[in-house]
Image (cartoon, rainbow, N blue to C red):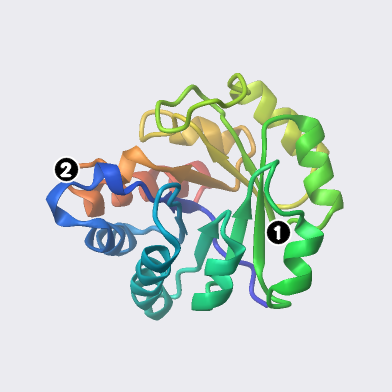
Amino acid sequence: MTQPDYSLYLVTDRSMVRSRGLAETVRAGIEGGVTCVQLREKKLETRAFIETATELLAICRPAGVPLIINDRVDVALAVGADGVHLGQHDMSIGTARGIGRPDWIIGVSAESLADALRAEAEGASYIGVSPVFATPTKRNTAPPLGLDGLRAIRAATTIPLVAIGGINSGNAREVIAAGADGLAVVSAIMAADNPRDAAMELRGHILAAKGQ
């Protein structure tokens, strides 16, 4: 299986998209350079969650962009998504691997070096390092790890790291320079006046930081 491109990883938040809607915001982000999408829905009922995931899959798959489902392994299975993203209190990686497709992408949130080491040892596809900076889009999180915390996790692990938390065009390059393989953003694209342009700007910073 070809290694997924996590470099510009969009995490959805329907509360930010205004009248344009979730699907059109995601579509615009992909047009601007988003390389991976995580559907995150904490309040949606199961049937509506599946309908939304199906709609996004129809946008992501033709573009070659993986669709990852946050938390809900059942929804990922139901729609044939490319994988799941698990928190520290969600289903274990081993259990998810046992019931999902063999080629599933399984990401795991890590709020500490210990979390990251455990995720890699248990077979995670990538580690979501969270939060790097303080962010209003996620509550009840651990204190920000900062760039030094990200560097420490990079030095101790070998699988891809996707940094999340307070990331935007102003700090994107330094986060990549500190060891992140990808940047996960929410408001920087979802709440942007022009999601396509916002994604293009972030993509440009990522490529520049990687010397591409």
Report the amino acid beneath label 2.
Answer: Asp
Secondary structure found at label 2: loop
Residue at 70 percent across and 41 percent down: it is 88
Residue 192 in the figure: left or right of residue 71: left
Q: Quadrant of residue 5?
A: bottom right
Q: Position of residue 138 (x, y in %)?
A: 47, 32
- Amino acid type, mark 1: Ser
Residue occupying image coordinates x 67% and y 31%: 111
Residue in front for this viewpoint, 138 or 201:
138
State the residue position of label 2: 193
> Between 121 and 154, which is closer to the camera in this rendering?
121
Q: Residues within 10 Å of mark 1 (few under 14, many from 20)?
A: many
Query: What residue lies at 71% left-to-right and 54% top-to-bottom?
Result: 91
Q: Which mark is residue 9?
A: none
Q: Position of residue 150 (x, y in %)?
A: 66, 30
Residue at image location 58% in from the left, 21% down from the top: 144
**Mark 2 or mark 1, earlier in chain:** 1
Q: Residue furthest right?
A: 121
Q: Which residue is mark 1?
A: 125
Q: Residues within 10 Å of mark 2 (few under 14, many from 20)?
A: few
The relative height of residue 68 versus residue 192 in the rendered view (above or below) is below
| Front-lying residue, 84 or 212 | 84
| Front position in the image: 31 or 75 | 75
Q: Secondary structure at mark 1?
A: loop
Asked if 98 appears above or below 32 in the picture, the reply is below
Task: Give left or right: position of 84 versus 7.
Answer: right
Q: Is residue 171 left or right of residue 142?
A: left
Q: Is residue 66 left or right of residue 91?
A: left
Q: Hey, which residue is sitting farthest left in the picture?
A: 19
Q: Position of residue 85 (x, y in %)?
A: 60, 54
